[in-house]
Image (spheres, rainbow, N blue to C red):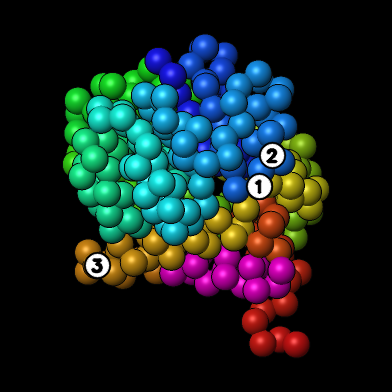
Amino acid sequence: MKAGFIGLGAMGAPMARHLHARGLLTAVGNRTQAKADALAAELGVRAARSADNFADCVVVALCVSLDADVLENVAALAQVLKRGAVVVDHSTVSVQTANRAAALLAAEGIGFLDAPVSGGVEGARNGRLSVMAGGDAEVLERAHPVLDAYAARISHMGATGAGQATKAVNQVLVAGINEAVCEGLALGEKLGLDPRVLLPTLMAGAAGNWFLDKRGATMLESRFEPGFKNAHMLKDLRIASAIAGSAGLQLPTLQQALADYAELVERRRGEEDTSSLIDLKRGGARRAGAE
C-alpha cells in the first residue's frame, strides 16, 4: 500500500514517521514547503509540490489546521486520486466540513473518513493515538493499515460526521479537565504545598488524569512549550460550542473554557501550550479590558 501524509506539524510529522516505519509512506506534503522537503529528505520519500504527487497513493491522510485547509486539499486530491482510494482527515473541523469533503470525493469514487485523533503530541510520537472515525465501515477497513501505524484504538463512531461529533465531546471533556486541574494547582501553589509531593499524591487518587500527569510539573514550573496550542484549543472549542448549540445544550464549563482560551489568544499567548491556562487561574494574566 502506498500512503501519503499532508500536514507535518507537531502531530502530523510523528504520524508520518510511523507510516514510514511500516514501509507505507510514499509522499509528504505541507503548506510550508521547506518542512515537507526536510522530512522527505530525512525519510527518503517524495516531497509533494502539488496534489499530483499523491496520484499513486491508495490512502492519503490529512492533519491540517482549518476547515478551509481540509476542503482545499480534498478538492485537489479529488482530481488526481484513483477511484477506490481513501482520504482520511485527522483534522478537527466541523461536521458540515466533513460532509462537504465526503461529497466532493464521492463524486469521483473516492472514499472519505473524518477521523480526528486524541492523545496529544505524546500519543502521536508513541503511536498511541485514539482515532474516532466517521464514514463507511468498508472504507475504514481499507484504511486500517495506515491507521494501525499510529493508533492505540480505532473506533468506528458512525456515518460521516460522527468522528467530528465525537471529537467535540472529547474536547468538552478536555476543556473541563484543564479548567479543574489549573484551578486546583493554582490553589495548591497558594497554599504552599510542595509540588514534588502534591502531584504524585493527586495522581494516585480519583483526581488523576492525563493532563495532570503530562502537564502538571511543567505548568508549575511555568514552562508552556506546546503540546497543544491555545489557538488550536480555541478553534476546537468554538466548533464544540456550535455543535452543542445545535443540539440545544448550554454547557457552562465549555463556555468558561472558551472565554479563557479566547483571552489567552487575545493576550498573544496563542502559540503556548494549553497548560498556560494556569496563569489565568493564578491571576497572573490580565483580564480582557484591564489595560
Residue that label 1 marks: 32
Front residue of 176/270: it is: 270
Q: Earlier in the sequence, mark 3 or mark 2?
A: 2
Residue 285 vs 108, above or below: the answer is below
Inspect this view and state whether residue 271 appears: yes
**Helix, strand or loop under label 2:** helix
Q: Residues within 10 Å of mark 3 (few under 14, many from 20)?
A: few
- The answer to whether residue 257 is magenta is yes
Q: Amino acid at mark 1?
A: Thr
- The answer to whether residue 130 is magenta is no
Q: Amino acid at mark 2?
A: Lys
For the residues labelled 3 and 2, the Cα–Cα distance comes to 38 Å
For the residues labelled 3 and 1, the Cα–Cα distance comes to 35 Å
**What span is colored magenta in the figure?**
253-268
Front residue of 71/207: it is: 71
Front residue of 121/289: it is: 121
Q: Amino acid at mark 3?
A: Ser
**Helix, strand or loop under label 1:** loop
Q: Earlier in the sequence, mark 3 or mark 1?
A: 1
The answer to whether the residues at label 2 and label 1 have Cβ atoms under 8 Å apart is yes
Q: Looking at the rendering, in which quadrant would you find the N terminus?
A: top left
Q: How would you classify the magenta stretch by its main secondary structure?
A: helix
Nearer the observer: mark 3 or 2; the answer is 2
The answer to whether the residues at label 3 and label 1 have Cβ atoms under 8 Å apart is no
The x, y position of residue 26, in whole percent, is: 52, 22
Residue that label 2 marks: 35
The x, y position of residue 48, in whole percent, is: 57, 35
Q: Is residue 236 left or right of residue 278?
A: left
Residue that label 3 marks: 246
Q: Residue at x 67, y 51 (%)?
A: 273
The x, y position of residue 103, in whole percent, is: 23, 49
Q: Is residue 109 left or right of residue 236?
A: left
